[in-house]
Image (cartoon, helix red, strand yellow):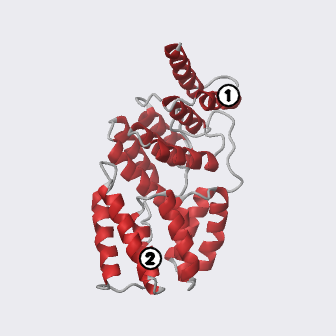
């Protein structure tokens, strides 16, 4: 990916279009603009934002109805699973909420608010032993956190969950205080994250991209850049998960196909990388930067192996 012109290009797109900048863009980070454009049968990002608004208004049944569609398209999205858990809890279905909290943590072990809310739910259900196990799991995450974690939020979550488990604070849950914040200007937040990526500040970019993902939902561009930043830091499993979600949100996302191909090259999976190259050839019958970049890296790797 050539990052040097990304910000300028995205700025032009903002000025030229009434659509959010996140829906456009070129190169590795952008979507399908300029190529074969098609996405999922539902606008998952729009449904997610509507679900968040319903939750904030206490309209849990409406939120659940829309979140079912989001999870139907992208079942491994941690944020949507977390919100589904809140919607279930808001309807008095605490036992049903547990599996969605657990899925949220499974798909993003750094979603610290989910640990706290699940711990509260366990204690409310009289399952203190499970809450203790959850606290130990969070402590394990903290001990292995390295440089990728948002330590401020992690420390707060650890303190809150400890208090819940020890019985020094109430444990009824609490949707309003643990819902994701809405971002007033997603375009500016996205451009800021891209600027961090341009500067090689991948840890900071991950934090900002995650906040954006929580606010606007599973948008392919954001998921793709989360995959990119995690891959650059050597977290290949995490990167793969984000690329998978990006392609679930938009199966023809050229950037995600390029970056996934690069991940396969890095991990020695040439046949899988070749399939991503074939997919880009299909998406770009008249050529595109994503195909050119991946083809160059693929051929370079093949030559080096000979």
Left or right, 299 with reference to 127: right
Label 2 environment density (alpha carbons within 10 Å; few <14, some 14–19, many ≥20): some
Front label number (1 vs 2):
2
Is residue 176 visible in the rendered image? The answer is no
Label 1 environment density (alpha carbons within 10 Å; few <14, some 14–19, many ≥20): some
Task: Name which residue lies at 51% across and 39% down.
Answer: 13
Up the image or down, 232 lies above or below 223; here it is above
Q: Which mark is residue 300?
A: none
286 or 156, which is in the foreground? 156
Image position, residue 9 (x, y; %): 47, 34
Residue at mark 1 to residue at mark 2: CA–CA distance: 47 Å
Is residue 129 visible in the rendered image? The answer is yes
Image position, residue 84 (x, y; %): 56, 71
Up the image or down, 81 lies above or below 169; here it is above
Q: Secondary structure at mark 2?
A: helix
Image quadrant in which you'd find residue 257: top right
Q: Which mark is residue 278?
A: 1
Task: Name which residue lies at 68% across and 51% down.
Answer: 40
Task: Name which residue lies at 61% across and 37% down.
Answer: 33
Left or right, 261 with reference to 113: right
Left or right, 238 with reference to 162: right
128 or 97, which is in the foreground? 128
Asked whether disc 1 touches disc 2, contact meaning CB atoms under 8 Å apart, the reply is no
The residue singled out by tag 2 in the image is 130
52 or 102, which is in the foreground? 102
Task: Name which residue lies at 58% across and 27% down.
Answer: 270
Image position, residue 70 (x, y; %): 63, 61
Image position, residue 297 (x, y; %): 51, 22
Up the image or down, 44 lies above or below 222; here it is below
| Number of on-image labels | 2
Q: Earlier in the sequence, mark 1 or mark 2?
A: 2
Q: Secondary structure at mark 1?
A: helix
């Amino acid at each position: 990916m050539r990052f040097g012109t990304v910000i300028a290009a995205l700025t032009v797109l903002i000025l030229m279009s009434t659509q959010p900048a996140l829906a456009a863009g070129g190169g590795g980070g952008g979507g399908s603009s300029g190529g074969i454009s098609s996405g999922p049968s539902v606008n998952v990002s729009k449904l997610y934002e509507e679900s968040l608004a319903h939750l904030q208004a206490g309209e849990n049944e409406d939120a659940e109805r829309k979140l079912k569609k989001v999870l139907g398209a992208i079942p491994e999205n941690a944020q949507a699973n977390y919100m589904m858990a809140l919607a279930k809890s808001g309807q008095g279905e605490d036992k049903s909420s547990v599996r969605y909290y657990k899925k949220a943590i499974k798909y993003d072990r750094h979603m610290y608010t989910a640990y706290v809310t699940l711990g509260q739910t366990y204690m409310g259900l009289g399952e203190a032993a499970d809450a203790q196990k959850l606290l130990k799991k969070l402590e394990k995450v903290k001990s292995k956190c390295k440089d990728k974690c948002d330590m401020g939020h992690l420390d707060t979550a650890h303190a809150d969950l400890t208090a819940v488990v020890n019985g020094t604070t109430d444990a009824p849950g609490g949707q309003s205080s643990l819902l994701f914040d809405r971002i007033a200007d997603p375009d500016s937040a996205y451009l800021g994250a891209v600027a961090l990526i341009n500067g090689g500040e991948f840890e900071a970019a991950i934090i900002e991209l995650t906040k954006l993902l929580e606010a606007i939902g599973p948008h392919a561009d954001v998921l793709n850049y989360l995959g990119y930043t995690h891959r650059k830091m050597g977290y290949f499993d995490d990167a793969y998960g984000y690329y998978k979600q990006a392609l679930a949100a938009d199966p023809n996302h050229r950037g995600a196909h390029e970056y996934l191909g690069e991940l396969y090259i890095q991990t020695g999976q040439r046949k899988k990388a070749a399939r991503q190259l074939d997919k880009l050839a299909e998406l770009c019958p008249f050529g595109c930067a994503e195909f050119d970049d991946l083809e160059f890296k693929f051929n370079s790797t093949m030559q080096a192996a000979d």
